[in-house]
Amino acid sequence: MGDSAECFYRLSMEMVMQKTELLQGTLDMLILKVLNRGAVHGFGIAQRIQQLSDDVLSVGEGSLYPALYRLQEKGWIESEWGQSENNRRAKYYRLTKAGRKQLEQETAFWGRLVRAITLVLETA
């Protein structure tokens, strides 16, 4: 690989890693937001995030289910087994009172962060 091709590859990989880190840092909030409207099974959560983001964000099982377990351990969501739309057994997740409070805090933080970044981008 030439120097310029190698440099481009490194930059591309850094951008992929940054996008991945951003998603991991905000995935909990996105899941909580989806569950704010009612109980949803895991696959439905991933679909809804993808739909609401105009197909920009895609959450794989390897990220989604560890996040769901983590949120459940923190007491922010709870789950129960039920039947999916196609009559399959599925675990449905729903927000707890503590999860609603966490969503409010995360949403407020995210709003402040977006405003701060926008200020820098507009004035720098």
Image (cartoon, rainbow, N blue to C red):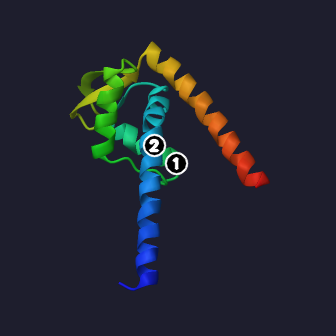
In the foreground, 66 or 17: 17
Count neighbours of disc 2 (C-alpha within 10 A) and say few if under 14, some if 14 to 19, many if 20 or more: many
- Residue 62, compared with residue 18, is above or below; it is above
Mark 2 residue element: helix
In the foreground, 88 or 94: 94
* Image mark for residue 53: 1
- Asked if the residue at tag 1 contacts the one at tag 2, i.e. Cβ–Cβ closer than 8 Å, the answer is yes
* Image mark for residue 26: none
* Kind of residue at badge 2: Ile
In the foreground, 52 or 111: 111
* Kind of residue at badge 1: Ser
For residue 88, what is the image quadrant? top left
Q: Is residue 48 visible?
A: no
Mark 1 residue element: loop
Residue 69: % across, % down: 29, 29
Count neighbours of disc 1 (C-alpha within 10 A) and say few if under 14, some if 14 to 19, many if 20 or more: few
* Image mark for residue 49: 2
Q: Give the side of residue 16 with respect to residue 92, left or right.
A: right
- Residue 91, compared with residue 120, is above or below; it is above
Q: Residue furthest front?
A: 3
Residue 64: % across, % down: 33, 40
Cα gap from disc 2 to disc 1, whole angstroms: 6 Å
